[in-house]
Amino acid sequence: MANPGMYTALTLLILVSCCRCSMWEWGPDLEGPWCAKRPFGEQCCDDRNDDCSVPILGTECYCDVFCNATAYDCCPDYWSLCHGITRRPSPTPFTTLPPRTTRFPSSITRNDCVKDGITFNPGEKLQDNCNECICEVYAGPPRRYEWRCADDVCLIRPSKIDAVNHGGHSWKAANYSSLWGLSLQDGVKYRLGTFPLEVNVVRMTPIRVKLDEVIPESFDARVKWKDLIHPVMDQGNCGASWAFSSTAVASDRLSIESEGAIKDELSPQHMLSCDVDKQLGCEGGYLDRAWWYLRKRGVVTEACYPYTSGQTTKAGDCQIAPRQRQGTCPSGAIYKIEKRYKATPPYRLRPLEREIMKEVMDNGPVQATFQVKEDFYMYKSGVYRYSNLSRDEAPENRLSGYHSVRIIGWGVERTPQGDINKYWICANSWGTDWGENGYFRIARGVNESDIESYVIGAWGKVTGDVRLRRLLQRNRRRRISSGKKFRSLRTCGRKQRRRNGGRCRRHKKKHKKQKKKLFEKL
């Protein structure tokens, strides 16, 4: 039998000699405590003890003598705590433990880190939708390796898709590869982008639309003004719906008012990069300030200033001066002042279904702001109504935000059960792979998700081309003269009509005054 003193001396000799060897070192970020966190009396273990370990960086380090026998897997404070030997940590600021290949704790009976039939090693990571998972030791009992995943709420949730599709709802849901892997918080931040309306904007007095004709059961601006309604764009991962919807409505109105003489698509990137007064670019913006910029500064075409923020998630620096008259575009094309378009002051419509329909039918698409809730991202087809499937879940599962889109028409859907679903046709800005080729239908007449609460219209303006400017003014005057912009303002009472011989003279004067004031703005 060997002498115990000789064994102890031999062990220390091996340890000290190993300290002088070229071994893997840890950085100052891992100085500990590690072994010192173990229960008193069990901090340092003799011989081999596979339970004498501490979790570290998704794997384990050890506090027994065997930790340096074959593969270096000692805890960073093992030498100082167990042997009183001070080792200088590596100057490297961060440390990643190397994979342990020669030691597998005998007390761990199985590895549950399996995905799609593939077994992962301790410390390995994978991405599960919007959550990152790492294979770590589970203390048990029994002790085993299993996945530890983040707990973020994902934007696309297969359980919600199944619940919508099999729950008797008026719409269908689907998975989108462009949205897979994003959290719900990411969706609100990067896929929307319209700030809630300020109090003074909400108080904006709406116009009254004259309702003097029968409104059809269905209408589509793409059919009435063929080739004049601009296609759906994709804002990508940039909260820029405030810029996309404003420039899209202005583009459509210019095409319609010019009777096809102007078919240019206005640049949302120009507005995104250059309209910086209290706007936050890809983090959101206000609609009233977007229209102010269109009215005062104007916006060039998409061909001149192409969209790039969807890939960078940044608005970028403005590359066009506010009063630039010549030079080159960001795209390299020649800058033309006549291709910088403006808009008149926007006007608000009353939140009445028929008045919104009449405005779209007479003058073209309008801009609408609505509240996007957690299930809308998964919309595929049908007439959208909020499913409210997350009503019993935590608030973080029901995050919502505001989004702005174009309303381009309406219609009616009759179900096999005999139900009638009235809907708006809206153009989104998430690309043509989303929804019904980039469009969606949403319940009409019930202010679903506030879609009818704040609806905006505007007319376009031309700055450089005199011929086009006169064409727009002539067509606009014809609309006003035909009474399509104003309804009768005869709102006086019975007594006043008797005094005025059955007429509301004061209101007629007000009507003429409003017309004259509008003409002066043109």
Image: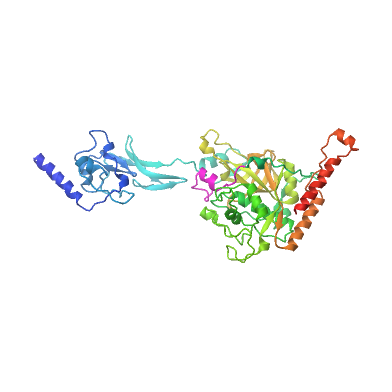
Whether residue 436 can be seen here: no
Q: Is residue 84 magenta?
A: no
Whether residue 153 can be seen here: yes
**On screen, residue 223 above or below 184:** below
Query: Is residue 408 toward the left or the right of residue 64 in the image?
Result: right
User: What x and y, as percent, mark residue 443?
Assistant: 66, 41
User: What x and y, as percent, mark residue 39?
Assistant: 26, 33
The structure residue drawn at horizontal position 58% and vertical position 49%, both measured from the top left corner, is 279
Task: Magenta stretch: give its range.
Answer: 175-196
- Dominant secondary-structure state across the stretch colored magenta: loop
Name the residue nearer the viewer: 338 or 10: 338
> What coloring was used for the rendering?
rainbow
User: What x and y, as percent, mark residue 396?
Assistant: 51, 38
Name the residue nearer the viewer: 522 or 363: 522
View extreme (front): residue: 323
How many numbered circles are shown?
0
- Rendered-image quadrant of the C terminus: bottom right
Name the residue nearer the viewer: 143 or 328: 328
User: What x and y, as percent, mark residue 346?
Assistant: 70, 49
Question: In the figure, residue 269 lies in which quadrant?
Answer: bottom right
View extreme (right): residue: 501
Q: Is residue 190 magenta?
A: yes
- Rendered-image quadrant of the N terminus: top left
